[in-house]
Image (spheres, rainbow, N blue to C red):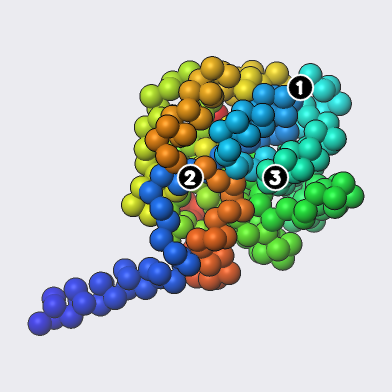
């Protein structure tokens, strides 16, 4: 009888949250594309290709030092504005790509405010998605992002995102960096059973940091794979259609003990 009661209790616990976090079930084959660092090829190569396949995406921008002014390496703010005009999500990656664990909360507020203000001055809707530079985090960030009205924040971790378990400020992702096509395709295939696959993509290629390049020919193969296999390809903001963000922010526990990094 005792065991029976324990079993019942466990079942009740494990089902609390189910259906409370979600507004509707996550369809299988849901993939989010996120692009980091505001690099030049996002405007010149990636965006036109995404349009060709009719895919949405999130672009996490910053003014990467020391050579943000080198337009062979990085997008201009004019190009970032055009991404917004083309319908993509423009989101915050801090002002100077400063790692969250290397800033005080005051400095972090300043870094986030810079991008928010810049976007506002250019008529880009105030962004409420964030990506951690170099996937580095710190406990203080949870309250800080809440205070600034953010709804999603992305880390690494090389695993799919389970919105019923993962806190919205620690959304895991896979990186597409490198030439291992099989690794990326296998990652994409994890988008099922309520889990979402978020891809982190740097330059295609990356003229600022060549070690995080995704080769253009492979990138197009990934888009083709997503298209031919009927994946739903979204921006991070589009998840508001499926997730009760307020509920998730209040009730899910941010687990900093998990791997939050991608190797690239
Ligand atoms: Zn970055």
* Residue displayed at 31% across by 68% down: 14
* Image quadrant where one finds the C terminus: top right
Percent position of residue 121, x then y:
89, 50
* Image quadrant where one finds the N terminus: bottom left
At label 2, counting other C-alpha atoms closer than 10 Å, the crowd grade (few under 14, some 14-19, many 20 or more) is some
Q: What kind of element bears circle 3?
A: loop
- Contact, mark 2 vs mark 1 (Cβ under 8 Å): no
As drawn, 179 above or below 249: above
As drawn, 123 above or below 15: above
Distance from label 1 to label 3 (Cα)?
A: 23 Å
Residue at mark 1: 73
Q: Is residue 27 visible?
A: yes
* Residue displayed at 13% across by 76% down: 3
Q: Mark 3 vs mark 2: which is more N-terminal?
A: 3
- Residue 217, quarter of picture: top right
* Residue displayed at 76% across by 22% down: 73
Distance from label 2 to label 1 (Cα)?
A: 30 Å
Q: What kind of element bears circle 2?
A: strand
Residue at mark 3: 87
Percent position of residue 195, x then y:
40, 50
Residue at mark 2: 232
Side of 110 relative to 236 (left or right): right
Side of 71 relative to 55 (left or right): right
* Residue displayed at 54% across by 52% down: 170
As drawn, 205 above or below 164: above
Distance from label 3 to label 2 (Cα)?
A: 16 Å
Disc number lying in front (2 or 1): 2
- Contact, mark 3 vs mark 2 (Cβ under 8 Å): no
């Amino acid at each position: 009888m005792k065991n029976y009661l324990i079993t019942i209790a466990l079942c009740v616990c494990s089902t609390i949250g189910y259906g409370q976090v979600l507004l509707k079930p996550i369809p299988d084959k849901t993939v989010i594309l996120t692009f980091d660092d505001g690099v030049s090829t996002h405007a010149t190569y990636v965006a036109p290709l995404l349009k060709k396949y009719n895919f949405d995406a999130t672009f996490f921008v910053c003014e990467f030092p020391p050579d943000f002014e080198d337009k062979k390496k990085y997008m201009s703010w004019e190009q970032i504005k055009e991404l917004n005009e083309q319908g993509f999500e423009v989101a915050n990656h801090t002002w100077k790509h400063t790692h969250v664990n290397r800033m005080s909360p005051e400095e972090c507020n300043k870094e986030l405010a810079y991008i928010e203000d810049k976007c506002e001055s250019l008529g880009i809707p105030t962004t409420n998605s964030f990506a951690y530079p170099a996937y580095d985090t710190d406990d203080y960030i949870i309250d800080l992002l809440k205070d600034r009205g953010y709804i999603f924040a992305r880390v690494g971790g090389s695993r799919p995102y389970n919105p019923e378990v993962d806190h919205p400020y620690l959304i895991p992702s896979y990186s597409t960096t490198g030439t291992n096509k099989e690794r990326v395709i296998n990652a994409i295939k994890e988008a099922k059973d309520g889990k979402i696959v978020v891809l982190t993509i740097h330059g295609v290629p990356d003229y600022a940091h060549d070690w995080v390049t995704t080769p253009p020919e492979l990138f197009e193969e990934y888009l083709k794979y997503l298209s031919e296999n009927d994946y739903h390809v979204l921006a991070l903001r589009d998840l508001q259609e499926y997730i009760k963000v307020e509920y998730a922010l209040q009730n899910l526990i941010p687990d900093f003990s998990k791997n939050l990094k991608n190797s690239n």
